[in-house]
Image: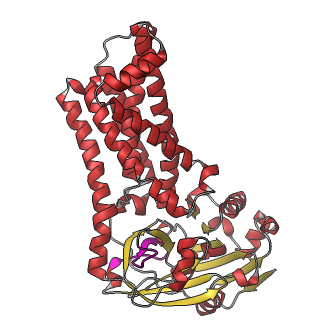
C-alpha cells in the first residue's frame, strides 16, 4: 500500500550552518595510501641488489609481503581511528568497506609471508618445512610474538567473515577487533628485530616508528581521550525515553551547550550509556531529529543493547563519540532531493527531511503500518514545508515493483536532476540505488551509508 501527501509547496527551513572543518576526500586518501605502498616496495628494492635461486625468490617474496602486511595493518587501524577529517569527508560507511577489504589483503599477505619465509629458509638450509618452522619459531628474535600475531590476525579475519558476522552480536564482534591492536604491537617488534630493511637503516627505522606511533597517537586521542573530553565538557544525560512503536524507542538527551558540537542532520554518534548493563559498549545510532540544544536518537530493539535502551532512566550520564558520518546536506549538488528510507533507516533521513532546503521527496518503505516509525512527525514536516511524502508497506519481496525506475520517476518528477539519499537494509539499499541509477541519476548524486557491521 502506498500513501502520498503532496500539499502546496512552501520553502523549507534553512539548513544549519555547516561545520568549518578540514575534510579528506576519498580520491586523495586512496592515492596517499597507494603512494605509501609504493614507498614500502621501494624500501625493499633499495636493499635488494639481486635475487638468485628458488630460496632467494621465496625469501624476498616473504620480505615484500611482510612489509606490505605491516604497512597495511597500520593503515587499516588509522582508517578506523575516527579521525574527523576522514569521518566527515570519506564517510564512515566507505571507511568501513575499505577496512573490510583491506583486512582480507592483510590476512592474505601475512599468510603468504609465513609460507614463503618458511619454505625459502627450508630450501636454503636443506631441511624439512616442519623442522624449519620449529627452528624459526624457537630461535629467531621475536618470532614467538610474530607467530601469536599471525594466529590472532587469522582468527580476527575468520570472525569478520560475513557468515560468521551474522552469528555474532555487534558487541562481541566489536570487542574482538581490539585484538588488532595487539597484533600490530607484536608484528611491529618482529619487523624491526628481523627485517633486513630496518636492521641497518636508521632512516627506515625512523619512518616505521613514525608510521606506527602516529597511528597510535590518532587512536589514543580520537578513540579514547576525545570521548572523555566531549563528555566532560558537554555533560550529556538522558532527558526522557519515549515509545514510538513496537520495539522502538526515542532517547532524548540534554546537556551543557550541545549545540556547540555542531552536529549535522544525517550524522550519528557512538553512545555509551553509563548503566550497569551498558557502560562497556559504545554503539552507533543516528540522530533522528535536527540537532541543537538537545539530541535525539530513535532505536529499534534488534539486539541486547538496543533493547536495553527502553529501560534507561532520566538522568543517566552518557559518554559520546562524534559526530560521525558523511550523509549530510554537504553532499547536495542540486536544489532537489529524493530520500529513500527502509525500516529504522528512516532515522538519519528524518533529520534531513526536516532540514534540507529546496524541493524534497521522501519515500519510506516498511513491512507493516506499525513499522512506519515517526510517521506522524513525517506527516507534519511534509505539510509544514510542502514536501512530497510516500509510504509503502508489505513483505520484503513486495518491494521490487516499488524500486522500478519508471515508478520512482513518477514519484519524483525530474528524478535525474535530484540528489538521492538512501538508508535502509542492504538488499533494499542495493535495489534502490540500482533503480535510481537506471532512471538516469548520476552516481555522484547518489548518497548512502550502511550501518551494518
Q: Which residue is drawn at 76% across and 63% down?
A: 405
Q: Which residue is drawn at 80% across and 74% down?
A: 394
Is residue 9 found left or right of 324 in the rendered image?
right
Is residue 449 found left or right of 121 in the rendered image?
right
Q: Nearer the viewer, residue 336 or 64?
A: 64
Q: Which of 12 and 274 is in front in this view?
A: 274
Location of residue 63 in the rendering, given as x and y in whole percent from the top left corner: 37, 24
Q: In which quarter of the image is residue 73?
A: top left
Task: Specify the principal SS of the magenta part.
Answer: loop
Location of residue 148 in the rendering, given as x and y in whole percent from the top left corner: 40, 37
In magenta stretch: residue 266: yes
Q: Which residue is drawn at 52% across and 52% down?
A: 97
Quarter holding the N terminus is bottom right
The part of the chain drawn in magenta is 261-279
Residue 275 higher or lower than 324, as above or below: below
Residue 53 makes an appearance in the image: yes
Residue 8 higher or lower than 426, as above or below: below
Residue 87 higher or lower than 162, as above or below: below
Name the residue at the left extreme. 202
Q: Residue at x 48, y 27 (%)?
A: 112
Location of residue 189 in the rendering, given as x and y in whole percent from the top left corner: 28, 36
Location of residue 172 in the rendering, given as x and y in whole percent from the top left corner: 51, 59
Is residue 386 found left or right of 57 in the rendered image?
right
Q: Nearer the viewer, residue 120 or 350?
A: 120
Quarter holding the C terminus is bottom right
Q: What colour scheme has been applied to the protein in the rendered image?
A: secondary structure
In magenta stretch: residue 149: no
Q: Quadrant of residue 2?
A: bottom right
Amino acid at each position: 500500500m502506498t500513501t502520498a501527501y503532496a500539499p502546496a509547496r512552501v520553502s523549507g527551513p534553512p539548513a544549519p550552518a555547516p561545520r568549518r572543518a578540514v575534510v579528506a576526500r576519498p580520491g586523495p586518501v586512496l592515492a596517499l595510501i597507494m603512494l605509501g605502498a609504493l614507498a614500502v616496495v621501494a624500501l625493499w628494492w633499495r636493499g635488494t641488489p639481486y635475487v638468485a635461486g628458488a630460496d632467494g625468490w621465496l625469501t624476498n617474496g616473504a620480505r615484500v609481503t611482510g612489509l606490505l602486511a605491516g604497512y597495511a595493518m597500520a593503515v587499516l587501524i588509522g582508517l578506523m581511528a575516527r579521525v574527523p577529517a576522514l569521518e566527515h569527508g570519506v564517510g564512515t560507511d566507505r571507511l568501513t568497506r575499505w577496512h573490510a577489504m583491506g583486512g582480507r589483503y592483510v590476512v592474505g599477505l601475512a599468510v603468504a609471508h609465513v609460507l614463503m619465509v618458511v619454505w625459502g629458509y627450508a630450501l636454503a638450509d636443506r631441511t624439512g618445512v616442519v623442522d624449519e618452522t620449529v627452528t624459526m619459531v624457537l630461535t629467531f628474535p621475536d618470532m614467538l610474538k610474530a607467530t601469536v600475531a599471525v594466529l590472532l590476525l587469522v582468527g580476527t579475519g575468520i570472525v569478520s567473515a560475513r557468515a560468521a558476522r551474522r552469528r555474532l552480536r555487534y558487541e562481541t564482534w566489536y570487542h574482538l577487533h581490539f585484538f588488532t591492536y595487539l597484533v600490530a604491537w607484536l608484528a611491529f617488534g618482529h619487523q624491526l628485530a628481523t627485517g633486513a630493511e630496518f636492521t641497518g637503516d636508521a632512516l627506515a627505522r625512523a619512518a616505521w616508528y613514525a608510521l606506527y606511533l602516529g597511528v597510535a597517537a590518532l587512536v589514543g586521542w580520537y578513540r579514547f581521550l576525545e570521548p572523555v573530553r566531549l563528555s566532560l565538557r558537554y555533560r550529556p544525560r538522558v532527558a526522557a525515553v519515549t515509545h514510538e512503536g513496537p520495539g522502538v524507542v526515542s532517547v532524548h538527551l540534554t546537556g551543557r551547550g550541545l549545540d556547540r558540537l555542531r552536529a549535522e542532520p544525517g550524522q550519528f554518534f557512538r553512545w555509551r550509556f553509563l548503566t550497569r548493563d551498558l557502560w562497556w559498549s559504545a554503539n552507533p545510532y543516528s540522530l533522528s531529529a535536527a540537532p541543537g540544544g538537545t539530541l535525539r536518537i530513535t532505536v529499534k530493539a534488534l539486539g541486547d543493547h538496543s533493547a536495553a535502551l527502553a529501560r534507561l532512566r532520566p538522568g543517566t550520564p552518557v559518554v559520546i563519540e562524534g559526530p560521525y558520518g558523511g550523509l549530510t546536506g554537504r553532499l547536495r549538488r542540486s536544489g532537489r532531493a529524493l530520500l529513500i528510507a527502509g525500516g529504522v533507516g528512516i532515522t538519519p533521513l528524518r533529520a534531513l527531511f526536516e532540514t534540507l532546503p529546496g524541493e524534497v521527496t521522501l519515500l519510506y518503505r516498511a513491512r507493516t503500518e506499525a513499522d512506519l516509525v515517526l510517521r506522524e512527525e513525517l506527516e507534519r514536516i511534509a505539510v509544514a514545508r510542502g514536501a512530497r511524502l510516500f509510504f509503502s508497506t508489505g513483505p520484503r519481496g513486495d518491494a521490487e515493483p516499488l524500486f522500478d525506475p519508471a515508478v520512482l520517476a513518477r514519484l519524483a518528477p525530474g528524478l535525474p536532476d535530484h540528489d538521492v539519499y538512501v538508508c535502509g537494509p542492504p538488499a533494499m539499499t542495493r535495489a534502490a540505488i540500482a533503480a535510481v541509477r537506471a532512471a538516469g541519476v548520476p552516481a555522484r548524486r547518489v548518497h548512502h551509508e550502511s550501518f551494518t557491521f
